[in-house]
Amino acid sequence: MNLQFRIGFIGAGNMAFGIAKGILSDSVPSTNVKVSAPSLRNLGRFQELNISTTHSNTEVASCSDVIFVAVKPVLVPTVLGEISQHVTDRHIIVSVAAGVTLATLEGLLPHGSCVIRLMPNLPCVVLEGALLLARGTHAKQEHSALLCSLLQRCGLVEEGPEAWIDIHTGLSGSGVAFVYLFAEALAEGAVKMGMPSGLAQKIAAQTVLGAGQLLRDSNVHPAQLRSEVCTPGGTTIYGLHALEQGGVRASTISAVETATARAREFGRNSAVPESRK
């Protein structure tokens, strides 16, 4: 990769920080990265990575080749309106705003702009994220290949149609919180039975980590792995019965469905009016 390749972040939240950590390498030194945010609150941790920071979004746009737009969905029109006149055909605009469609993004930028939607999740901050990207009308395979190369240290990176992005938001973006809720409940169950809280939380975290790594690395369907833990009349099948009585499977499916629907709602609310296209 060209050592002069420059990357900018507009927005300094957890997603921007996780991605920034992942892309820093010998081919993308910290001196080639710049981050903007309106306040100093989140910029300090970027400065600890020797990344240059600013309060000017236009400064980031002017000096970057790839621009990650990592702000809340409601702020996307304002931010893109601010930087639009600085976007040229050299830029790749990467939006990580939940629900904001490619059509909306393209409608807010100069005609022909190269736009990619990216949905990461919180474990990017520990380089164990799950990221899905979708190309816009003018983004080519070489652009998505470049982005995948940049992001490879952030975790699992896949490409798919835009219709999958909102589903990925419900599955993996919001799904992280669902896993935390389950881990919390696991620990609380152990506390109820007499284990100290600190130890229960530590073991619950390791249980989730180990189960996830085994599921990922074995390439085996989760139902098969689950069956391998169960023995006739044993503790696990009794516990699974209790979970099914509580509707855990149906509730989890509904949670992903509801989160996906909410992401799609964001997309409808952020759509660019025909008069602005």
Image (cartoon, grey):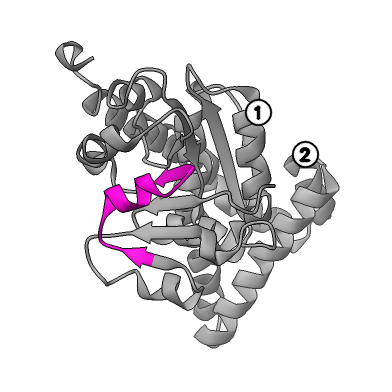
Q: Is residue 267 above or below residue 186?
A: above
The extreme top residue here reads: 274
82 inside magenta stretch: no
Residue 201, x across and y down, in percent: 55, 77
- In the image, 236 versus 224, the foreground residue is 224
Q: Quadrant of residue 220?
A: top right
In the rendering, which numbered label is found on residue 251? none
63 inside magenta stretch: yes
Q: Amino acid at mark 2?
A: His
Which tag, 1 or 2, sits closer to the chain's start?
Answer: 1
- In the image, 203 versus 125, the foreground residue is 125
Q: Quadrant of residue 236?
A: bottom right
Residue 38, x across and y down, in percent: 22, 61
Q: What residue sits right under mark 1 in the picture?
A: 142
- In the image, 171 versus 139, the foreground residue is 139
Q: Is residue 277 left or right of residue 183?
A: left
- Can the viewer see residue 127 in this picture? yes
The residue sitting at 77% across, 39% down in the picture is: 221
Count every numbered label the image shows and give the total.
2
Q: Secondary structure at mark 1?
A: helix
- Can the viewer see residue 12 in this picture? no
- In the image, 163 versus 192, the foreground residue is 163
Q: Magenta region: which residues?
A: 53-69
The residue sitting at 55% across, 65% down in the picture is: 30
Q: Is residue 60 above or below residue 78?
A: below
Camera-side mark, 1 or 2? 1
